[in-house]
Image (tube, helix red, strand yellow):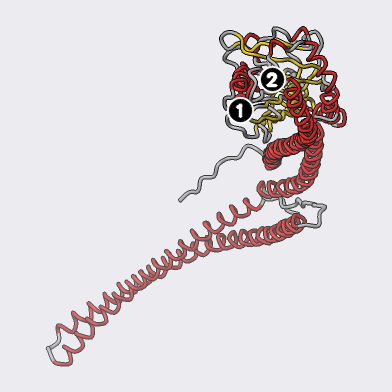
Amino acid sequence: MKKITKQQNSTLKKQFITRMLIVLIIILSCSGAIQYMYLSKMISSGVAIEATKVSQTIEQGIEETRAASKAIELQLDLKLKLIAQHISDNLGDKPLEEITNQDLLALRDEFDIAGLTLFEEIGQGDIVGVKSTEPSDIGFSFKEFLGEESDGYKIMYDLLHGNELKVTHQTYVDKNTVILPIGPSGSHSEKPTFYKYGYYVDDDKDYMINPYFEANEVYNFTQEVGPNTWIKTVLESNDDVAEIAVVSPQVYADPSLMEDPTQPYKKIEYGEFKSESEKDKEILAGLSENPKRTAYIDKQGEHAYYKMFIPTKDGRVIYVGLDYNHLSAPLQNMSLILLAFSLISLVALFILSTSFFSKIYKNIQVIISQIKKLESGDFTTQSEVKDKGELANLSASANKMTSTLSHVLKDTTKQAEKVQTLSLDLKAEADESVEKVYAISIDLTSKAREDAYEINDFLEMLEEKLKTLPKTEEIETILNRVEEVRIISSNRAVSATDITITLSDLMKSMQAQSVELSEISGKLFENMYQFKLK
């Protein structure tokens, strides 16, 4: 079966360089992809850890501030309740109509409080301030200010009527007392002043006593040592942090909560959230029902934020916005450096490999050139490979093979010359011998035939003579012997003729073979001259 080989147009060097380039591209692509995935993972992990640390710091500040504030407010709550009870005792059984503002002013000064207001129900459940040390508090209506459906109004109504209190936001509450957290006054709107409000209803009274005192110092203290201070400290000490805020997810889920002034709900309780997006609003609204840590990368123009929302135990959410570009820059630079060094290493490897292969390819080309010259019949060429490896051994073997073939062909040429000479001599001798043998065979054949004719004539004469004699046994024996002699003579003539013909054919055959041998030696000699020998 004939083997079919595909013709390769590209050289071995070209194939090697192409494959090396393909391998380098694959290695660079895989390396870049792996580094990109590893970088993304490291950035995500590092950013998450950083955000968690920041959130823990803020949460710690909130907890510490809350603990301090609770301890302070508890003392204030107990003090305010005690003041309300003393005020109720001092008012005694005096009807509300007989109580004057001067009486309230005296009580305010006695207990060193900021103000005192008495509330009663007027009309259809309207709880209004009727007596007060502050003229702005007289006529203040919870129903009008808060709304009849608000939780704040319902608390005041239940407290005044002795109903069960359903209070969700307070610092202190019991059967007939509600102490609100420190907050701004609803009736002192011209100046943001913070007060501690207490509402007390004695069992034997149909009006509500509302003592209060200023708590600016307490409020300012909690602000100075509270979350805002912690947030400011973190922002100043950590360049990776862009924004920090403590937010209320309940407000994002139900913005109407901010409409009730008695409720302490605010969207942003501490810090700033300037990069707020619609997606952030959706996330925070969802965290009100399903509190779980959530993080994602938010790209806004040239800025990129890693935003993490961390729910706290009290229902709030700590938002930490990290500068993703600033945080990922060192890792990206490190990745670029590693990629650059990888590229340099691979290029250096490519240059060294191609240089080494070019040297090998050059030596291979020297050997190929020698083989091509051998193919054309030139057995004088020798290859010179300046190397100490296998190619040098191959070159030496090729040179030795060339020398051996050259010597063999030289000997073959000499033998061909001898064969040609001998064949020419044999042909000449065969030509001469054929003529001689042919002449001799003709003479012998002629002579044999002449002798046979003579013998046959003599035997015929003898036979005729014997036939004239009386027939005796002896005569019969002689006649038989005569016939035998005739046969022998005839056979000898025929044999001589056959021998002559056979010898003639043999000599002709030798002549033809000498001619053929001469042609073969001539052709061989002609072929030997096609090779170039030393």
Number of the label disc, if any, that sits on residue 93: 2
Measured from the top left, where is residue 35 in percent x and y?
A: 72, 39
**Kind of residue indicated by mark 1:** Ser
Query: Would residue 461 appear left or right of 417 to someone viewing this image?
Result: left
Please give the residue where the numbered disc 1 appears in the rendered image. Answer: 288
Front-most of 233 and 135?
A: 135
- SS class of the residue under badge 2? loop
Res. 290 in view: yes
Position in image of residue 346 (x %, y %): 77, 41
Q: Nearer the viewer, residue 151 or 397?
A: 151
As drawn, the label of residue 177 is: none
Callout 2 environment at 10 Å: few (<14), some (14 to 19), or many (20+)?
A: few
Disc 1 crowd, CA 10 A, few/some/many (<14, 14-19, 20+):
many
Q: Is residue 185 above or below residue 224?
A: above
In which quadrant of the rendered view does residue 47 lie?
Answer: top right
Q: Residue furthest left?
A: 471
Look at label 2 and name its amino acid.
Asp
Quarter holding residue 287? top right
